[in-house]
Image (spheres, helix red, strand yellow):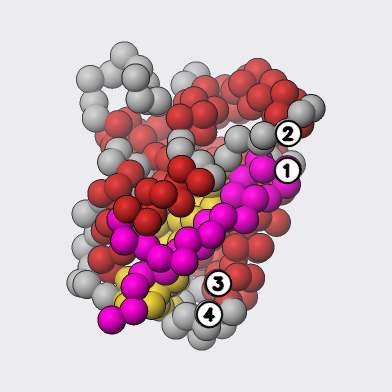
Amino acid sequence: MAALPYKHSEQSKKDQVEEMFDNISPKYDLLNHVLSLNIDKVWRRNTIRKLSDKNPTSILDIATGTGDFAITASEKIKNAKIIGIDISAGMLEVGVQKIKKKALSERIELQKADSEALPFENAKFDAAIVGFGVRNFENLQKGLAEIYRVLKPGGVFYVLEFSKPKKSPFRQLYKFYFTKILPTIGRLISKDSRAYTYLPESVNEFPDGDNFLTILAEVGFVKNKCFPQTFGIASIYEAFKKEI
């Protein structure tokens, strides 16, 4: 059975994910940084460092949430125009306020949209990024195919996502933290009893590492690589759309 935020709901996974993020949006940034001990910021910077070498001028940030990835990209890649999309209006509302405070509104635009039905023409963007969002796609291959469609030929795609450490004892420590400690803290702060139980379930279900590289190749991406981060807690995936 697929990991779902609210297992007894009759809503689709997409609708449940939207509801979950609307529910936790006021506390999302606080929880994100506390629960990851701020290491998530390092992972984002590492990803954007790789992206900046490609000098993109148009970037799509899918599942942008509260805009952290888009903001990191704009601070590192000064000449880029970034569009961030998300299905959660609550998350986007928080993101818009953050972007205004940082005076980045002219360079970052946020809009409500579905990652599996992107409202953009073919070959629009130099680059696309997703931070901790692909495991929430209802149909993973459909979402990846949409990203492939809107990239320009030769365009680069970066995914930052949680993965499962392979080596002991870190694998056991990670599993204990992710399944016992994290859901308890998340539940206390966010007041959503399911959101931070869904997180480890969705990570466990996600086809990480070589399995995800295979899916990227099936969609059409080429030169696909995986860069594990912090003992394999997360991974950066790099992929390209074929040149014409």
Secondary structure beneath label 1: helix
Q: Which residue is mark 2?
A: 167
- In terms of sequence position, does the residue under pointer 2 or pointer 3 come before the other? 3
Q: Residues within 10 Å of mark 2 (few under 14, many from 20)?
A: few
Q: CA distance from mark 2 to mark 1?
A: 8 Å
Front: mark 2 or 1: 2
State the separation of the CA atoms marked 1 and 4: 26 Å
Residue with the mark numbered 4: 54
Quadrant location of the N terminus in the rendered image? top left
Choose top left, top right, bottom left or bottom right for residue 233. Answer: top right
On screen, 17 above or below 188?
A: below
| Closer-to-camera residue (75/48) | 48
Query: What's the amino acid at mark 4?
Result: Lys
Q: Residue at x 34, y 73 (%)?
A: 242
Percent x, y of residue 174:
70, 29
202 relative to 115, above or below: above
| Amino acid type, residue under disc 2 in the picture | Lys
Q: Which mark is residue 51?
A: 3
- Mark 3 or mark 1, which has the lower sequence index? 3
Left/right placement of residue 106 relative to residue 161 reads left
Q: Is residue 83 above or below residue 52?
A: above
Q: Residues within 10 Å of mark 4 (few under 14, many from 20)?
A: some
How far apart in space, not on screen, are marks 4 and 2 (Cα)? Answer: 33 Å
Which segment did they paint magenta?
Answer: 219-244
Residue that lies at the very extreme toward the right in this rendered image: 169
